[in-house]
Image (cartoon, rainbow, N blue to C red):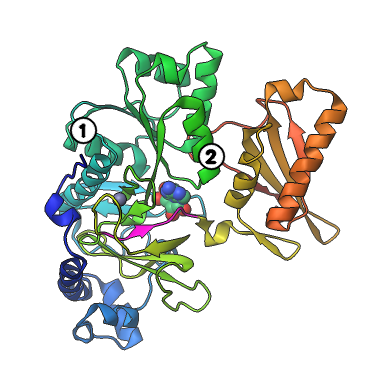
Amino acid sequence: MIEYWDPLIERMPVDELKAIQEEKLKSLVHYVYNHSPFYKKRFDEAGISPNDIQSLDDLRKLPFTTKQDLRDTYPTGMFCVPREQVVRYHASSGTTGKPTVVGYTENDIKEWTTSLARALTSIGIGRDDVVQVGYGYGLFTGGLGLHYGVEMVGASAIPSSSGNTERQIELMQDLGSTAMACTPSYFLYVNEVTKKLGISIADDTKLKCGIFGAEPWSEEMRRRIEEQTGIKAYDIFGTSEISGPLFTECTYQDGIHIWADQFLIEVIDPETGEQLADGERGELVVTTLAKEALPLIRYRIGDLTIIRSGPCRCGRTHPRIMRILGRTDDMLIVRGINVFPGQVEAVLMDIPEVAEHYQLVVDREKELDTLRVQVEVTRDVFSDKISDLMVLEKKVTKALQTVLNISARVELVEPGTIPRSMGKAQRVIDNRNI
Ligand code: ADP
Ligand code: ZN
């Protein structure tokens, strides 16, 4: 039987959801115009008055907002409430530059937690579960965000945060964790340490699922994690600007449900800013319909994805986004060919002899960009003859060339060589900017 946190909302007919969105959008534009000098100026400059927004179609008339706007108004210039109403601050991880500050009213925290309660319920987490939260606690939204969601659904939270991996594994066994929330790359490390300790996640723990996100990962990586550990690996998405981790896949693992009564999503062509149709890949743009402290209008998140609005087998009517390919600015251009690290991961993970740890190194030699793909091989493969390793190296090079059309120098390295990550993995080292 499929469980819902809020069946009425989660299975609401699409036209009713749209009516809710329209009402919320109409009041949102008045709210931001009247409460934030930033938005008033932005609307005035664009020649838009809140009264011009009468339907969901009018959304496209509104100007975009970007991370740069949050940086320009650092720390709280885009907030719509006075400091007394802010009950919490967080900050982004600063993956792409100066970190931005976000804030929440009491109600914002409630909405955020509700979103996660729906999501966790959709992957079968409830009163019987013990969830180990291995996302960082602190300024990063991952730890505290998940924590509140776990408590709301009545499961037990273990706020283990990231790092201290042997202790994490001990707690996992002693307290019987049934789920672990962390970055997929950290989970790979946890699995590795577990094996070193002679413990098997499949046989010696109660873990049944992982809630993995905060960084791009591929279907192929999911398959490997699931096969090696016997757990279900679910994708979770969010960014600090829209509150933090908010949305997950359901048990059908066919896209991440975005709660339409709280968020309005679009996908646009990153070059022209034009809205794209359902099923077309582009940049995700989010308008927050329920946030008070820091509502965002048409915020360009920068992540590339596809929206699918059709019904899901789970009965939820809210639209789904497909696996994130990466951010627009994650894209490497190597000798004119566009490549996302996630695509390289997908190719690598399809080759059984290579392990899950890899790194892309980009250099510029004599005006020419070069890409090196360093990837660990399994212990067995590494002890093979040099000639076997060379054959494998050729196989990987050819697969990258055939599938992605990139010529990369492949370097097979010993297990344990590539740095392990406790949070977001750094998969690309670009030496061109230094
Ligand atoms: P930042 O990393 O920008 O400083 P955040 O810590 O809020 O800020 O991270 C949010 C970003 O992390 C997203 O915009 C996206 O690029 C990435 N991310 C989060 N979850 C996922 C996911 N499930 N798949 C791919 N990327 C993700
Ligand atoms: Zn579903």
Asked whether residue 11 is drawn in magenta, I would say no
Quarter of image, res 164: top left
For numbered disc 1, what is the local secondary structure?
loop
Q: Amino acid at mark 1?
A: Gly
The span picked out in magenta is 318-324
Rendering coords of residue 72 (x, y %): 42, 66
Dot label at residue 307:
none
Farthest residue in the bottom direction?
47
Task: Kindly identify the residue that appears in the image at 32 percent across and 42 percent down.
Answer: 251
Q: Is residue 192 above or below residue 110?
A: above
Q: Is residue 110 above or below residue 179?
A: below
Badge 2 density bin: few <14, some 14–19, many ≥20, Cα 10 Å: many
User: Residues at badges 1 and 2 in contact (C-beta under 8 Å)?
Assistant: no
**Is residue 376 toward the left or the right of residue 254 in the image?**
right
The span from disc 1 to disc 2 (Cα, nearest Å) is 26 Å
Q: Amino acid at mark 2?
A: Met
Task: Kindly identify the residue that appears in the image at 47 percent across and 32 percent down.
Answer: 226
